[in-house]
Image (tube, grey):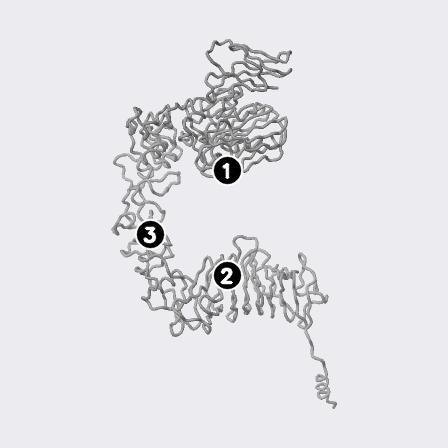
């Protein structure tokens, strides 16, 4: 028999040592392909084998797209920077095994459905900052994970993210874990290592995500400092939960949310995630009456206010310490009488601890326990829940609609009371529904008590509070002794506490308001719309309305009267202003039904935009606390028909012609933040804002003027150019103080007060606004006033002229005495004013 063993042994001795070759992924795996267990895109054009090490840089390796078990056959798989290992498997049972997966700057990413779970076994070593991203579903690392570099987890695009779970009990990972989103879970018996150094130096679990910890911490104290006050924040995620089976290897559970190291020198708090050198139970190094140990356990730091209440449970930190409760958990509160009502809550509302959970001291049908859970006031019948969900607090309904002798403890009686009214009812017929009355705390059974005047004394609540600080004033009182009682001062918008301020001279400077600039407008020949925003200043002008009404300061919402526009004090001399919410506005009453619609389930009134003519002016007065967001001065931007937007966009005045209006030209804009001096924006001051548009040239001008500046004409801040267009008889909502959307809700309203909205079918000049400088004539036209009332001026063929006259030169005192006068053929046109006046001032306007 021949023996071959010696020869085989000799042969083995002469073979060269085998070396693993480096193989790279040369291209990214395409959809429905995988190089995980095939030649795919590997540089050697062969399927992975144990003879080679595999590297991925920039490219991506997809897993097989099924739910089966798969093992990577290579000696190792390294993810370099940019290298991606993408999970495309299905189901929740198939395991992917990589015996030596090295994260050297690359990342693992879940890229399939949320019901598919990536299960990764083998061994994982984090050698450089890398990431494991459960972007579209959960990832569970069954493999032991080692290394000390940073590891991030979270999501790329999904706000919630999914969960990354460590499941091995053989982990030796001691790097930082940054939970940028989603959740990190340390499974039962799985371990996570911390290496502690000098004060504050240790790896952490941190980030804005969540940590659910049910495994084992392995804390290496070999290099830890030991000075009193030294501490280390080990878990600082935005949310963390230490579960029932959490443990620290070799440490003692103190059964008080803390663990102590062998020998007791160190303590770890699961409340704050903080490790610290353990002081004795009484040490209070910052002398704030809160022991250091308790502060670090509870907050992770010293220096907390003993009177503070970070969890908002109405018990101070000192009370929580004394009661042994958690100062950062509003469900863990002192309850010394054990009645299930927090001590702090009882003391706040009752001043003692005598309340019982089932008591109902305010008679609103809700017990103290109910009110605690609902966050309502157990001593105020108006503050309660809304069991039948009709928009009204049940206690408020009981107060106003229950009849004498009715027993609310009887459920049928209570149901009957609550069924009598709903939020839209108006039992006193004052135009304000029950929801509005409840919000304003007015009486829904008294027509004199309205949301604007809750005590029903004829003085608006806003006026009383502004002038007296409360609602105690009476209409017949005269605190300043100027012969005008409070009611007269309110109606005249004068100061009831200043004897010099009277209804005819609100600023008390000795000059009647009627003689001071500025003053409210009167309708002239070019006025299309004029809103004074209160009854005191008369009517609105809408020439194409079927029955133009008087705007009395009451707006509508879905044709339901509301008090949102009831007059708030305006600038002196202007009476009342509209007080707007950001979703209100005043549209045109074009159909004569006396409803000023701005949003409706029906079609809102549409204004005939062709009436604006070849040039127009939009303006108003505003008083806002800040220049933020979009605030429309005049909006013609309906949901179905879009014409233009004239608005404040943050600090910018803008005019934007829109496609349905025949335009779509460049936006004209000016930044008010660039203004300095007397017209610079000041919060809660009154400003006049206007724009003019000339459709023949596209020229657009913006005016911005502070009313109290003493200006004699409007302040021109910008001249720009946009498309030259007309509205082609377009019908659209035209809304003062809002965008004008007819469906989907109103939007982009003025967030403050507004007044004196005017639309004109002329391009007005700077001296033709509220501030008019009284120029008697236009000097380039007038040649002479030849005799009393006899005017002559140079004229042009084909032009027409308007003559305006004033006898006082006061702002807004010019009236039209002749209109559409044709030019004579001589180049000079004359006009004779037949009125026999002692003095007069004239202005001549030329039109095409």
Residue at 32% from the left image edge and 26% from the top image edge: 487
Q: Relative to the observer, which residue lies in front, 533 or 58?
A: 533
Q: Which residue is mark 2?
A: 184
Residue 224 higher or lower than 411, as above or below: below
Q: Residue 267: x percent and y percent?
A: 39, 68
Q: Are marks 1 and 3 in contact (CB under 8 Å)?
A: no
Residue 727 drawn at (x, y percent): 60, 27
| Image vertical order of residue 610 relative to residue 785, above or below | below
Of labels 1 and 3, earlier in sequence is 3
Residue carrying label 1:
676
Q: Earlier in the sequence, mark 1 or mark 2?
A: 2
Is 133 placed left or right of 625 in the picture?
right
Q: Secondary structure at mark 3?
A: loop
In this orientation, does residue 262 appear? yes
Left or right of 574 on screen, residue 607: right
Work out how far the residue at label 1 is from the one at label 3, CA to CA, in angstroms. 48 Å
**Secondary structure type for disc 1:** loop
The part of the image, by quadrant, that contains residue 761 is top right
847 or 594: which is nearer to us?
847
Q: Decide which of 826, 736 is in the foreground and name it.
A: 826
Mark 1, mark 3: which one is toward the viewer? 1
At which x and y percent is residue 448? 33, 28
Cα–Cα gap, marks 3 and 2: 33 Å
Residue 403: percent from left, percent from top: 28, 34
Which picture quadrant has residue 327?
bottom left
Dot in front, 1 or 2: 1
Mark 1 to mark 2 CA distance (whole Å): 54 Å
Front position in the image: 695 or 513: 513
Mark 2 residue element: strand
Q: Characterize the local packing of mark 2: few (<14), some (14-19) or many (20 or more) Cα atoms within 10 angstroms.
A: many
The total of numbered circles placed on residues is 3
Residue bearing mark 3: 314
């Amino acid at each position: 028999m021949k023996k071959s063993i010696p020869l085989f042994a000799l042969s083995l001795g002469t073979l060269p040592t085998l070396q693993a070759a480096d193989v790279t992924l040369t291209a990214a795996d395409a959809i429905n392909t995988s190089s995980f267990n095939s030649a795919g895109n590997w540089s050697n054009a062969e399927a992975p084998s144990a003879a080679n090490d595999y590297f991925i840089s920039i490219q991506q390796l997809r897993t097989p797209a099924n739910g089966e078990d798969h093992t990577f056959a290579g000696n190792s798989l390294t993810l370099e920077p940019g290298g991606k290992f993408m999970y495309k498997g299905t189901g929740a049972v198939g395991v992917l095994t990589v015996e030596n997966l090295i994260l050297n700057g690359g990342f693992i990413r879940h890229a399939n459905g949320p019901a598919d779970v990536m299960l990764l076994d083998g061994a994982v070593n984090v050698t450089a900052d890398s990431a494991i991203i459960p972007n579209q579903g959960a990832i569970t690392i069954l493999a032991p994970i080692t290394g000390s570099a940073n590891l991030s987890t979270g999501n790329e695009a999904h706000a919630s993210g999914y969960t990354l779970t460590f499941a091995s009990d053989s982990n030796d990972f001691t790097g930082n874990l940054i939970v940028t989103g989603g959740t990190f879970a340390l499974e039962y018996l799985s371990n996570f290592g911390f290496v502690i150094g000098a004060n504050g130096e240790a790896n952490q679990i941190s980030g804005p995500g969540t940590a659910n910890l049910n495994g084992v911490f392995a804390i290496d104290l070999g290099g830890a400092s030991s000075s009193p006050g030294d501490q280390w924040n080990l878990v600082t995620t935005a949310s963390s939960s230490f579960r029932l089976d959490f443990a620290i290897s070799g440490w003692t559970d103190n059964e008080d949310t803390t663990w102590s190291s062998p020998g007791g020198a160190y303590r770890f708090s699961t409340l704050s995630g903080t490790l610290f050198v353990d002081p004795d139970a009484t040490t209070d190094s910052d002398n704030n009456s809160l022991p250091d140990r308790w502060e670090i356990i509870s907050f992770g730091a010293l220096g907390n206010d003993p009177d503070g209440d970070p969890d908002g449970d109405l018990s101070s930190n000192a009370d929580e310490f004394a009661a042994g409760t958690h100062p950062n958990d509003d469900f863990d509160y002192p309850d010394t009488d054990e009645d299930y009502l927090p001590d702090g809550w009882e003391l706040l509302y009752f001043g003692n601890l005598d309340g019982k959970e089932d008591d109902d001291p305010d008679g609103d049908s809700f017990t103290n326990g109910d009110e605690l859970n609902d966050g309502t006031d157990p001593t105020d019948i108006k503050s309660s829940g809304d069991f039948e969900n009709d928009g009204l607090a049940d206690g408020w309904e009981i107060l106003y609609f229950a009849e004498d002798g009715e027993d609310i403890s009887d459920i049928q009686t209570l149901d009957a009371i609550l069924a009598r009214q709903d939020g839209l009812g108006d039992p006193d017929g004052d135009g304000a529904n029950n929801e509005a009355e409840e919000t304003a705390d007015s009486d829904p059974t008294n027509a004199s008590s309205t949301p604007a005047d809750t005590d029903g004394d004829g003085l608006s609540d806003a006026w009383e509070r502004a002038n007296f600080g409360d609602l105690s004033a009476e209409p017949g009182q005269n605190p300043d002794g100027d012969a005008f009682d409070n009611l007269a001062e309110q109606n005249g918008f004068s100061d009831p506490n200043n004897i010099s301020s009277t209804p005819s001279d609100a600023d008390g400077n000795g000059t009647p308001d009627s003689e001071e600039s500025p003053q409210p407008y009167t309708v002239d020949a070019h006025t299309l719309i004029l809103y004074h925003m209160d009854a005191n200043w008369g009517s609105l002008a809408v020439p194409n309305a079927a029955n133009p009404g008087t705007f009395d300061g009451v707006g509508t919402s879905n044709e339901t009267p509301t008090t949102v526009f009831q007059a708030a004090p305006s600038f002196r001399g202007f009476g009342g202003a509209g007080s707007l919410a950001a979703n209100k506005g005043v549209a045109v009453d074009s159909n004569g039904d006396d409803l000023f619609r701005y949003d409706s389930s029906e079609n809102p009134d549409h204004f005939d935009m062709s009436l604006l003519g070849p040039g127009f002016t939009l303006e108003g007065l505003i008083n806002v606390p800040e220049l933020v967001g979009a605030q429309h001065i005049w909006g013609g931007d309906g949901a179905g028909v879009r014409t233009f937007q004239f608005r404040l966009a943050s600090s910018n005045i803008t005019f934007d012609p829109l496609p349905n209006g025949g335009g779509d030209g460049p936006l004209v804009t000016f930044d008010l933040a660039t203004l300095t001096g007397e017209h610079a924006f000041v919060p809660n001051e009154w400003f006049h804002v206007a724009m003019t548009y000339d459709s023949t040239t596209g020229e657009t001008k913006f005016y911005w003027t502070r009313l109290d500046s003493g200006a004699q004409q409007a302040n021109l801040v910008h001249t720009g150019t946009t498309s030259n267009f007309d509205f082609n008889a377009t019908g659209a909502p035209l809304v003062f103080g809002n965008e004008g959307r007819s469906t989907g809700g109103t939007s982009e309203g003025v967030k403050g007060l507004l007044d004196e909205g005017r639309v004109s079918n002329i391009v007005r000049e700077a001296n033709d606004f509220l501030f008019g400088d009284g120029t008697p004539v236009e000097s380039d036209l007038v040649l002479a006033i030849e005799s009393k009332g006899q005017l002559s001026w140079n004229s042009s063929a084909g032009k027409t002229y308007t003559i305006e006259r004033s006898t006082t030169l006061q702002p807004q005192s010019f009236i039209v005495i002749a209109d559409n006068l044709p030019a004579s053929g001589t180049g000079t046109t004359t006009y004779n004013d037949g009125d026999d006046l002692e003095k007069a001032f004239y202005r001549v306007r030329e039109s095409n």
